[in-house]
Amino acid sequence: MQTPQVTLIVPLYNEEETLPHLIERLDAVLASFPVETEVVLVNDGSKDRTSEMINVLGLSNPKYQIVELSRNFGHPYAITAGMQYARGNEAIMILDGDLQDPPELLHDFYALIKEGYDVVYGVRKKRKENFLKVFAYAAFYRILKSISTIDMPLDSGDFSMISRRVVDLLNQMPEESRYVRGMRTWLGFNQYGYEYERQGRFAGNSKYSFKALMRLAYNGIFNFSEFPITFITRIGVISLIISLIYTGYALFMKIEHGAVPEGFTALLFTITMFGGIQLISLGIIGEYVTRIFFQSKNRPLFVVKNHIVNSKKNG
Ligand code: UDP
Ligand code: MG
């Protein structure tokens, strides 16, 4: 196989149900795409038959490169691994393995890259998922956009095509808490939002646990916004002003009218409320400290246990 020009990166975690259909769709797209293309399938520590299935594919079809992580590292790390192994010298495309991101958009995305864009990302017009999830996502992206230090696009995930020079830059970013869509936006260059209709998952359930989804949201907020810290300062300043005014008022009442303020309930309420605010503030600072802690360890972002490329098996 010649050096590929484009690499498709697909992270997989327990996708045995969807896999045969995914491969079918990918093969059909590749057959109609006149550019030398490889697919990097990243197995993110699946516990089902995903590993067996992709190994068979990797050994028989040189278009497929297989990267297996030593355990489940999580979606952003699987993508990161894929980007480090991608050989496409013009561009890479990231898509989910559950067929929510149509591989057929390869043609349109590539055409835009050829027009001179460095990043073409999918913007979800409609989400075919349950109401609560749609609402939560919409709210999160809007909040993040309003507090973020960079201009975060709305309703877009990791589904994108990225030029080689931007992939090289992403690969050089050593961030431990990886919010890939944010890092991609942070890099700048010419970016294009491509509207598409996001399908429902082809089979199985979402592989993102609630915990993983929360971590992703936290990573977006804490890595791309100073809002949490300024928020603490603002609450502090507001409380101080209120308390000064109230102290002045209480002193005035005592001196002028000899009245001592009453209100044990109000006191109790104030103490518990500020106890809560202080603990939340500590937690927010803790978030930053934890990030510094993990970053300072300088651990590799992922560990690969098996790699198949061009029908040759290494390691
Ligand atoms: N995925 C992964 N590691 C994980 C969770 C998910 O590689 O720990 C993959 C998954 O197999 C899929 C993609 O990431 O190809 C997106 O995950 P999913 O569809 O479950 O997320 P959702 O669409 O529900 O946000
Ligand atoms: Mg999905």
Image (tube, grey):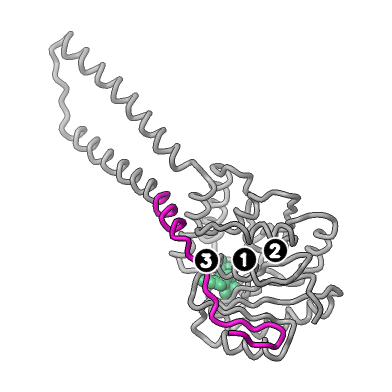
Quarter of the image where one finds residue 92: bottom right
For disc 1, the neighbor class at 10 Å (few under 14, some 14 to 19, many from 20) is some
Looking at marks 3 and 1 on the same chain, the residue that comes earlier in the sequence is marked by 1
Q: What is the residue that sits farthest to the top in this orientation?
A: 256
Alpha-carbon distance for marks 1 and 2? 8 Å
Q: Residue at x 24, y 20 (%)?
A: 247
Q: Which residues are magenta?
A: 287-315
Q: Position of residue 67 (x, y in %)?
A: 61, 78
Instruction: Give, as a three-letter code, the residue at label 2.
Output: Glu
Looking at marks 3 and 2 on the same chain, the residue that comes earlier in the sequence is marked by 2
Q: Nearer the viewer, mark 3 or mark 2?
A: 3
The C terminus - image quarter: bottom right
Question: Can you identify the residue that label 3 sits on?
Answer: 301
Q: Residue at x 51, y 66 (%)?
A: 300
Instruction: Give, as a three-letter code, the residue at label 3.
Output: Leu
- Res 232 visible: yes
- Asked if disc 3 and disc 1 are in contact, CB closer than 8 Å, the reply is no
Question: Can you identify the residue that label 2 sits on?
Answer: 197
- Indicate left or right for 209 with 246 as reference: right
Q: Secondary structure at mark 1?
A: loop
For disc 3, the neighbor class at 10 Å (few under 14, some 14 to 19, many from 20) is some
Image label count = 3
- Res 125 visible: no
Q: Is residue 178 magenta?
A: no
Q: What numbered label is drawn on residue 128?
A: 1
Q: Residue at x 33, y 45 (%)?
A: 282
